[in-house]
């Protein structure tokens, strides 16, 4: 199985991409809804949670892990690689950076994400490592997560908040914008409208699944070890009607979320 975890429901946008691009594969999802959000927590705490989450997915039979959460991808990869050196663990940041660098023409790249992701400066670091002279405009947009979870995708209030967050980024004349948080793809139509046609949008979920596909094509034995009897399981550390509602709405199919408690 392909194991995917996130701080909560957001990583379902990555599951959606998996369904779209790799419909023949099974997956097991863990959303840490009891401890969400990660986006305003310390790197140490998020790393400790991430290590537990991966243990759970491995116990459920995952052979490959996707860290769907941008915040965990930004701060927890060292801890994960140290704890699970033999497990292929994919994060969502590197594929997004690679794609942004492939499509930008001016090398002026905006990045939006949670406060923890933006404070980690990981996007700047990775972009500058590969492209000298690139200019990165980072912006934390902490209010986007609750707005998306409330399904305020078209509300005037969302538009106003978006203007406040994105105008300073747009003014810096970027030509590429990375949606560095699980929830932001749901705001994509409004973001595209705000940024204008000249700005290319990069969705890390899309790029990450493409990267996984390529990895499996290059590693046939790993590919063969993944179950092709398509089955998807969804676990959460807290299950409320809202979790079920969001999961079903975002994935466009009935989801039966199971509650799990770590000892
Ligand atoms: N999943 C988180 C991310 O992509 C957003 C929600 C949170 O703050 O936990 O950064």
Image (spheres, grey):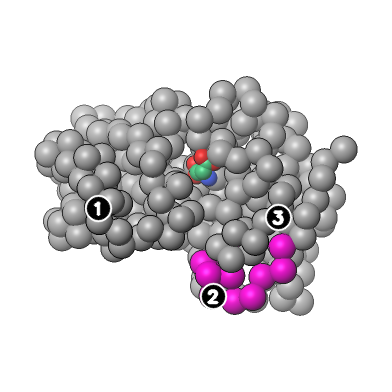
Residue 150 x, y percent position in the rendering: 46, 55
> Picture quarter containing residue 122?
top left
Q: Nearer the viewer, residue 258 or 91?
A: 258
**Residue beneath disc 2:** 252
> As drawn, is 251 to the left or to the right of 88?
left
Give the alpha-carbon distance from disc 3 to disc 1, as whole Å.
Answer: 30 Å
**Residue beneath disc 1:** 159
Which badge, 2 or 1, comes first in the chain's sequence? Answer: 1
| SS at circle 2 | loop
Query: Callout 2: few (<14), some (14-19), or many (20+) C-alpha neighbours within 10 Å?
Result: few
- Regarding residue 112, the answer to whether it shows in the image is yes
Query: Callout 1: few (<14), some (14-19), or many (20+) C-alpha neighbours within 10 Å?
Result: some
**Residue beneath disc 3:** 239
Q: Nearer the viewer, residue 54 or 226?
A: 54
Residue 186 x, y percent position in the rendering: 40, 60
| SS at circle 1 | helix
Please give the name of the residue rendered at 65% of the width and 47% of the height, measured from the top-left corner. Answer: 33
Residue 201 x, y percent position in the rendering: 29, 55
Please give the name of the residue rendered at 15% of the width and 57% of the height, measured from the top-left corner. Answer: 196
Look at the image and give the residue range highlighted in magenta: 247-257
Q: Residue furthest right?
A: 263
Q: Are marks 3 and 1 in contact (CB under 8 Å)?
A: no
> Picture quarter containing residue 108?
top left
């Amino acid at each position: 199985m392909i194991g995917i975890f996130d701080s909560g429901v957001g990583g379902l946008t990555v599951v959606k991409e998996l369904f779209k691009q790799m419909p023949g594969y099974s997956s097991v999802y863990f959303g840490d809804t009891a401890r969400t959000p990660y986006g305003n927590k310390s790197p140490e705490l998020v790393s400790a949670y991430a290590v537990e989450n991966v243990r759970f997915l491995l116990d459920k039979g995952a052979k490959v892990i996707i860290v769907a959460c941008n915040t965990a991808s930004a701060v927890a990869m060292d801890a994960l690689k140290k704890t699970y050196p033999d497990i292929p663990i994919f994060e969502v940041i590197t594929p997004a950076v690679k794609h942004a660098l492939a499509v930008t023409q001016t090398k002026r790249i905006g990045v939006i994400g949670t406060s923890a992701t933006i404070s980690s400066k990981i996007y700047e670091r990775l972009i500058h490592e590969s492209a000298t002279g690139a200019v990165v405009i980072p912006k934390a947009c902490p209010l986007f997560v609750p707005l998306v979870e409330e399904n305020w995708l078209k509300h005037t209030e969302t538009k106003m908040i978006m203007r406040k967050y994105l105008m300073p980024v747009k003014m810096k004349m970027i030509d590429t914008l990375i949606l560095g948080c699980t929830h932001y793809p749901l705001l994509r139509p409004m973001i595209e409208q705000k940024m204008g046609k000249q700005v290319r949008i990069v969705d890390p979920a899309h790029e990450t699944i493409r990267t996984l596909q390529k990895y499996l094509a290059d590693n046939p034995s790993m590919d063969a070890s993944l179950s092709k009897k398509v089955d998807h399981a969804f676990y959460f550390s807290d299950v409320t009607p809202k979790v079920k509602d969001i999961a079903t709405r975002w994935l466009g199919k009935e989801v039966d979320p199971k509650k799990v408690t770590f000892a």
